[in-house]
Image: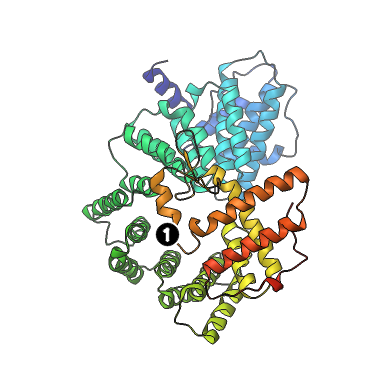
Amino acid sequence: MGKKSRRNKKNNAGSLRKGLAAVPTAPAPTAATPAICCETLYRLLGAKKYDEVLEVESKYRHLDTFSDDPAKDVHILHAFGCANNTNSKDEAAVERAIHYYERAKERIEEANAGDQSQSRNSSKLAIGMNLAVLYSADRDMEKAISSHRWLLVNCSRHQVSADYVIELSSNFNRFEKFEYAIEVMEEFMDMMETFEEEFQAESNLICAYIGCGDFPKAKAVNKKRRSTDINWFQSGNIESGLCNYEAAIAHYRKFLAELQEKQEYDSPSRTRIVCSVVLAKTLLQRSAENEAEAFAIFQEELDRCVDPLDREEILIGMGTWFRKVNKFDQSIEALHQLCLSATGPHDSMLPRANKAIAQTYLEQYCTDTTLDIDQRTAILRHATEHSNHVDEVSTKMHITRAQLFYFNGNKQQAYYHLELYLDARLVECKLRCYTCDQRVGHRYVPVSCASCKVASYCDRQHQKLTYKNERICHKVLCPLLGHWRMAKKKQKKHQGLTNEDRRDYRKVADTFFESICPHVKTSTSSYYDGLIFID
């Protein structure tokens, strides 16, 4: 089918609001027309007299069906769903719309399978598209993708509108369901016809690839994009994900220059703030020589930022990167400002702030050689207190808690959290590059560490970047990862570990803790005999 005919077909479907399919062609009236006249309902919808449709709906919503003919019920239910769907701010109305669409799907299945009338197909198309978008906007992603797949089974892909595809993938990206956005966009990229559709579709697909850590695919789409308006911010994110920091910095600068040309640079734009903060982070990743410029950018954005949420993101970035360059006092100051700006005990930023402060105190405890024993004790206490305010269960928190338990003398809990960390790393290293977190794929992660046989890398350059770049770098983790990989193999084969295996693990673990915090002294007599292992 040619572009022109597809465009006409798509336009004929109309739209109640962007991305949602509207009213299909009304079914022809028959002698068996039910008490609710389908033709009348569709005429009211076509005239956008939604209140009148809702008046009819309120009288009959208590009924399970409206006629003995499933096909007629489909049209009535679809009309009621469309009328309720016009009020997206009313949660109850949206729930009723979803309810009507789901009931219409059930009646479609009951209808005669041999009936492939145009109105029936139009109803399937509109119901499937509306349901998928409504579910994706309400964060029920499993039902959204299920409705989308139902739509593809019941309708021709050429009937699907570009607005629907773009809005659905945008919702998936917004709630970080990038794999679903990729599934939707890869199927329909060739359906985009106008410049605006192409630009938005390509941007959504690139965003989804970046979110999944598949930077080579994102770069390939960005290089071959059909629209000529390049998104320099996305280009910078791709190069940053591939650890090409110099190229990423150049792209971010181009993006900010474009904002300045459009006279948007001085406005309180969240886009500008996000790009400036990312530029500052990338400058620090590129080289320590960029430290002055990077923190000047952070401070400049903080000084002119008025939105509390934007200020929080800037402060968390400043605190994190002050820690990474060993400016612990500045890091603590920025993060304490963040705690004070949080609006309450349930504020989502509070756990992030406490986690960042705990990590800063921990880094200072382990690396600041100017501290005396009393100062180190106080800093360790602060780190432990802030860590106790974090309920997050993640790989990074396991390694943080392992260190805190060990340095506080609770070795049993330290070994336990270290095991959880190592278990997670064994899985993650099979899926992503150790350095850039890029998703593993054919030709993308061909290099593995010859020593531990766990860590995987995109290339030799990434292996060099991560080998001894931080305190807990691969240089100190490598023996521990290799030992744990062999221990898990033995545990699986013999359904458990012997006492000798456990003693060996404790020795390797103690060596690891001593290597990341040299002033910590251990004694072999302090081992715990009751070590708990995770099966």
Q: Mark 1 points at which residue?
A: 469
Q: What element does badge 1 sit on?
A: loop
Q: Looking at this view, is 369 or 19 the one in front?
A: 369
Scheme of colours in the image = rainbow
Residue 209 in the image, given as x and y percentages of width and height: 45, 40
Q: Where is residue 84 in the image (x, y as percent from the top left)?
A: 59, 41
Residue shown at 68% from the left, 48% from the top: 488
Give the answer, above or below, for where 430 lies relative to 517.
above
**Residue 379 as seen in the image, left or right of residue 77:** left
Residue 98 visible in the displayed image: yes
Q: Where is residue 225 in the image (x, y as percent from the top left)?
A: 33, 33
Report the front residue among 1 and 340: 340
Residue at image coords 33%, 72%: 303
Left or right of 325, for residue 30:
right
Above or below — where is 529 with respect to 21? below
Whether residue 43 is situated above or below residue 386 in the rendered picture? above
Residue in front for this viewpoint, 514 or 137: 514
